[in-house]
Amino acid sequence: MLQPVMHILKQKSIILASGSPRRKELIENIGLKVTLCPSLFEENLDPKSFNSFSEFVEETALQKVLEVEKRLLSEGKRPDVVIGADTMVTLGKEMFGKPTSEADAFNMLSRLSGRGHTVYTGVVVKTQHKTVKFTEKTDVFFGNVDDKQIKGYIATGEPMDKAGGYGIQGVGGTFVERVEGDYFTVVGLPLYRLSSVLYDMFKDQI
C-alpha cells in the first residue's frame, strides 16, 4: 500500500513513541525505518473521564506522542513523523491493562478463558503540520483453558508486560480460538489503518 510514497517516507525521520519491540518490528516489516523512543508519559489518565474506550486509548497515544516530540525538540531534534499507540483489552465495561502481579495475570486470564473480549488500539500519527488519531478494535475469542495451563503460561513470563496478560503473537496465541477483526490491532499496531493514514499524509508529494 505504501509503495508509491515509500521513497518519500524513507527520507523522513520517523519516531515510534514506544519501547515496544513488537511495534517496531511491525513497522519495519512493511519497509519503514523507525527509531524507538519510549515515552515518559505516566499513562495516568482516568478511564472514567472518557466517553468511550476509543477516546481513552487515543488520548493516551496522543500524550505519548506529545511528550516524545517535546523532549526531542528540547534536544534540538525535529522528527518528521511521530507515531504513538496504546492498546487496551476490555471485557464488557472493564479495561484490562498490564498485570501488576502474577496473581493479577492469573485473574485476568481466568476471566478471559472460554469467552470473547475486545481489544482496542488507539494510534496517533503526528507530523509538523498535521495530527491524525484513530482507533481499531478487534474481537478475540479464547478457548477453554484450565488453571494448570494458565499457571504454566504465567511461568513463561510473557504475560507480565502485555495488556490483558497475554501476547497473541507469542505463546499466548495458543489460547486464542479465533479473531474477528485486524490481527495486528491485537499485537499493538493496526497496519492497514496506519498505512492508509501515512499514504494520505504524503501522497500529495508524489
Image: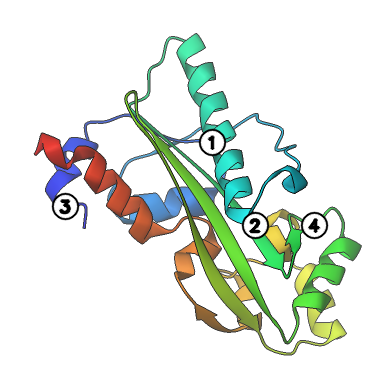
Position of residue 175 measured from the top left corner of the image (x, y, whole percent): 66, 81
Q: Is residue 91 above or below residue 121?
A: below
Residue pictured at 53% horizontal, 57% vertical: 188
Q: Earlier in the sequence, mark 3 or mark 4?
A: 3
Q: Earlier in the sequence, mark 3 or mark 2?
A: 3
Q: Earlier in the sequence, mark 2 or mark 4?
A: 2
Position of residue 48 measured from the top left corner of the image (x, y, whole percent): 76, 47
| Residue type (three-letter) at the residue carrying disc 1 | Leu
Q: Earlier in the sequence, mark 2 or mark 1?
A: 1
Pointer 3 residue: 3
Residue pictured at 63% horizontal, 54% vertical: 52
Residue pictured at 29% horizontal, 53% vertical: 196
Q: Which label is found at residue 88?
A: 2
Position of residue 181 measured from the top left corner of the image (x, y, whole percent): 46, 73
| In front of the other: 197 or 177 | 197
Q: CA distance from mark 3 to mark 4?
A: 39 Å
Residue pictured at 86% horizontal, 83% vertical: 147
| Residue 42 at least partly seen | yes
Q: CA distance from mark 4 to mark 1?
A: 23 Å
